[in-house]
Amino acid sequence: MQFHIITLFPKAFSSYLGESILKRAIEDKKIKVTFYNPRDFVENKWKRVDRPPYGGGPGLVIEAEPVIKAIASIKKKAKIIWLSPSGKQFSNEYAKKISKSYRDVVIVCGRYEGIDARVKKVFKMDDVSVGPFVLTGGELPAMIILDVMARQVPGVLGNLDSLEERRVSTSEVYTRPEVITVKGRRYRVPKVLLSGHHAKIDNWKLEKKNSRLTYFGKSV
């Protein structure tokens, strides 16, 4: 699977992609990540791609033409994702759907006050948000989307059962030692996890998962 990232700041991805599972996935050619900087698609000597917005307002807007040229340079059938706080909520279900249907995914990262909306009139794309908040740019959301989709690629995790959504899982996990002592107080691993009784363990995990969902007032 190949990810094509449209961004003014490709170096922002270096540390995350250079560590752990994603680094290994790139080295093993399970996934490929290519960057396209809109600055490389302008002819002015200053490599400027941002201008004040029409209609007034603070900040600058990234011009449409360099972003259009960057996307057009990708000569493959791809799903294009436009990162936007007003887009539809990104989810595991969406990631699985896209990873099964496309070998190439384009992620467009905005900056400043955003990107000229005419880009979306030229290409068919999905408006996607990673959460109900606003960030300074699309690079962090792009990393999130890349990470979630890469996990769906066979071989990236080594064992597909590592995918939490394919098994009974909970965020409350334990490992050795069985007992730890902090400030004179002893903390033990729940007995059920030491029982070897898989059905009981799965029930315990489901109870923990359901109680967490109830706490946050939502369901999946």
Image (cartoon, rainbow, N blue to C red):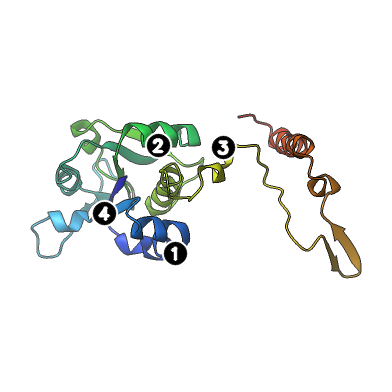
Label 4 vs 1, first from the N-terminus = 1
Q: Residue at x 26, y 54 (%)?
A: 34
What label sits on residue 34 in the rendered view?
Answer: 4
Label 3, label 1: how far apart the Cα atoms are: 23 Å
**Label 1, label 2: how far apart the Cα atoms are:** 26 Å
Work out whether mark 2 precedes mark 4 in sequence or the reverse, and give the earlier one: 4
Q: Amino acid under label 1?
A: Glu
Q: Are marks 1 and 2 in contact (CB under 8 Å)?
A: no
Does 172 sit left or right of 184 as displayed? left
Tell which circle, 3 or 2, labels the residue nearer the N-terminal end: 2
Element type at marker 3? helix
Which residue corresponds to the image point at 82% horizontal and 54% vertical from the top-left?
189
Instruction: Specify the amino acid type for callout 3.
Output: Glu
Going 15% across and 58% down the picture, which residue do you hit? Answer: 40
Q: Which residue is mark 3?
A: 165
Q: Secondary structure at mark 2?
A: strand
Label 4 sits on a secondary structure element that is strand
Residue 39 vs residue 151, the one in the foreground: 151
Q: Are marks 2 and 4 in contact (CB under 8 Å)?
A: no
Question: Mark number for residue 207?
Answer: none
Name of the residue lying farthest toward the right: 184
Which amino acid does the dot numbered 4 rest on? Answer: Thr
In the displayed orientation, state which residue is furthest to the front: 196
Camera-near label (4 vs 3) is 3
Residue 75 in picture, x, y percent from top left = 15, 42
Position of 72 with respect to 140 (left or right) is left
Q: CA distance from mark 2 to mark 4?
A: 20 Å
Name which residue lies at 43% across and 53% down.
140
- Look at mark 1 in the image and give the residue it sits on: 19
Name the front one of labels 1 and 2: 1
